[in-house]
Amino acid sequence: MEPYLPETDSETDADIPKESLAKRLRGARRVRQEEKILQEKSFAQRTMERFRKSQGVLYHFLDQAGALFMFTGEFFRRFWRSPYEIKETINQMDEVGSKSFLLTSVVGLSIGIVLAMQSRGTLARFGAEAFLPSMLAFSVIKEIGPVLTSLVLAGRLGAGIAAELGSMKVTEQIDAMEVAALKPFHYLVVTRVIACVVMFPVMTILTDVIALSGGFIETNLSTGMDYRLFIGEAFKSMRFVDVTVDTLKTSIFGFIVGIVSCYQGYSVRGGTREVGQAAMQAVVLSSLLILLADVMVVRVSLMVFGDVSGG
């Protein structure tokens, strides 16, 4: 008697009808096409989201730029009108000047010493070590001194002004001053901007003097150069217009720092978190605009007054 073998449902490829196999292949192709279409749709959606996000960033930038220009126009409109807060302006000049002197002095001294140390070897390689005082004077007075001093002051004053005005805005102190008819724009904005415009060139001159003094100290210790020879060589090729233009351009930098910082503080909405963001944005935007303004001022000064070789 033969053993009983149960029937199984397994089928070989030969037992599968050709029509059923074709349906399965068509179904698999349809699934792959649908997946491809979904992937293309998701890629298009991500692209559109990125485009909308970039549009939002652009619109926000244009909105902020327009608001800043309107704030600047409001400053010039109220600048000529009373009340003239002379006492507060002097207090703000003291804040910008004397309380920043130590910081700018350290910056100037380090600039002069480092420039002298690093430049001597290069100049000696070409037999031009005698031009070291002149190189120091040109580097410090024409570019390094004004720009670094302005950037340092932007970091200190920009954050302070924006945080102070932002805190007053959040706690509604500015609104209270407006209700009391005290004209807070004159007291808080005009005084700070004028102080920055006036004191930035003064701080730049002090930084330049300290930087050249540091360069002379390093040169005297290394080569024994007399101070009269150092000063004579430093300013032998320097023109008065070079000193004047490159020092007074810091007034533009001071205006940028003052107006941007006051705008960031005045436009704070929300709480203490927004105050910190306004202080950070004031420093970043002021530094960026200082560098851009420096490029334009140097280009215009070269077109109007020429360079040293042409003078």
Image (tube, rainbow, N blue to C red):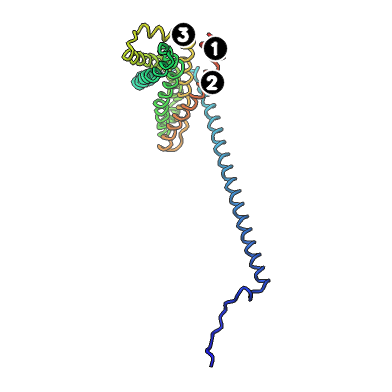
CA gap between label 1 and label 2 equals: 14 Å
- In contact (CB < 8 Å): disc 3 and disc 2: no
Identity of the residue drawn at 59% across and 45% down: 47
Depth order, front residue of 1/116: 1
Find residue 237 and name its label.
Answer: 3
Identity of the residue drawn at 51% across and 24% down: 292
Q: Earlier in the sequence, mark 1 or mark 2?
A: 2
- In contact (CB < 8 Å): disc 1 and disc 2: no
Residue 164 occupies quadrant:
top left
CA gap between label 3 and label 1 equals: 14 Å
Q: Is residue 196 left or right of residue 30?
A: left
The residue labelled by disc 2 is 296
Find residue 306 and name its label.
Answer: 1
**Is residue 198 visible in the rendered structure shown here?**
no
Q: Amino acid at mark 2?
A: Met
- In contact (CB < 8 Å): disc 3 and disc 1: no
